[in-house]
Amino acid sequence: MTNWRAVAVGVALLVAVGTVGVSVPVVGQIGAGLVGGFAAGYVAGGGPGRGAWHGLVAGSLAGLVVAVGIAFLSGASDGPLGLLVDGFGASIVVSALTLLFAADAALAGAVGGWFERRSASSGRRDDADDGVES
């Protein structure tokens, strides 16, 4: 079952960090995927598989949001952004951006899910049998 709150947190961070990261073209987008995917995986919890799924969904949705924004902006300008979308076609640009955001977000989501599981299991000292009678 998908935790949509975790996905929303991931999408919000992906779009926010990705918007700021536009000034550093490739590194900014990869950083956005790592931050947003990790957050989605951590909030979702449940281990690496669940974290990767939530990171993937968050990255895909954020890629679609950014691609629609780029398509909208390219229609408003005839600069290099407009030429990029017109030259490749909107569907290829949307697919490429979705894949770019989703791939690293899924990997970071797996790490976030693993990290959440590790931090949750290390905090449960009261359930452990340490051999001391109370």
Image (cartoon, rainbow, N blue to C red):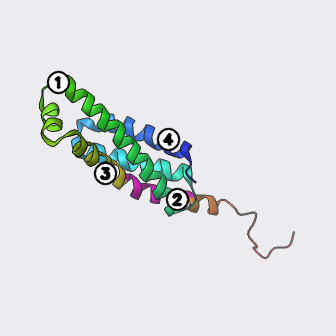
Query: In which quadrant is the C terminus drawn?
Result: bottom right
Residue range in magenta is 105-116
Amino acid type, callout 2: Arg
**Percent from the top left, x then y, of residue 16?**
38, 35
Q: Is residue 112 magenta?
A: yes
Q: Name the residue under label 4.
A: 9
View extreme (top): residue = 76
Q: Earlier in the sequence, mark 3 or mark 4?
A: 4
Say whether residue 54 is left or right of residue 3: left
Residue visible at 38% across and 41% down in the picture: 62
- CA separation, marks 2 and 3? 19 Å
Amino acid type, callout 3: Leu
Q: Do the residues labelled 1 and 2 touch (CB within 8 Å)?
A: no
Q: What element carries label 1?
A: loop
Residue visible at 44% across and 41% down in the picture: 11
Q: Are marks 3 and 4 in contact (CB under 8 Å)?
A: no
Depth check: 8 or 17 in front?
8
**Percent from the top left, x then y, of residue 20?**
32, 34
Q: Is residue 20 visible?
A: no
Residue 99: give its label: 3
Q: Is label 3 or label 4 in front?
A: 3
Q: How many labels does the image show?
A: 4
Amino acid type, callout 4: Val
- CA separation, marks 2 and 4? 15 Å
Q: Mark 2 points at which residue?
A: 50
- CA separation, marks 4 and 1? 31 Å
**Percent from the top left, x then y, of residue 89?**
18, 40
Q: Is residue 48 magenta?
A: no
Q: Is mark 4 on a helix, strand or loop?
A: helix
Residue visible at 46% across and 59% down in the picture: 110
Q: Do the residues labelled 2 and 3 touch (CB within 8 Å)?
A: no
Q: Mark 1 points at which residue?
A: 77
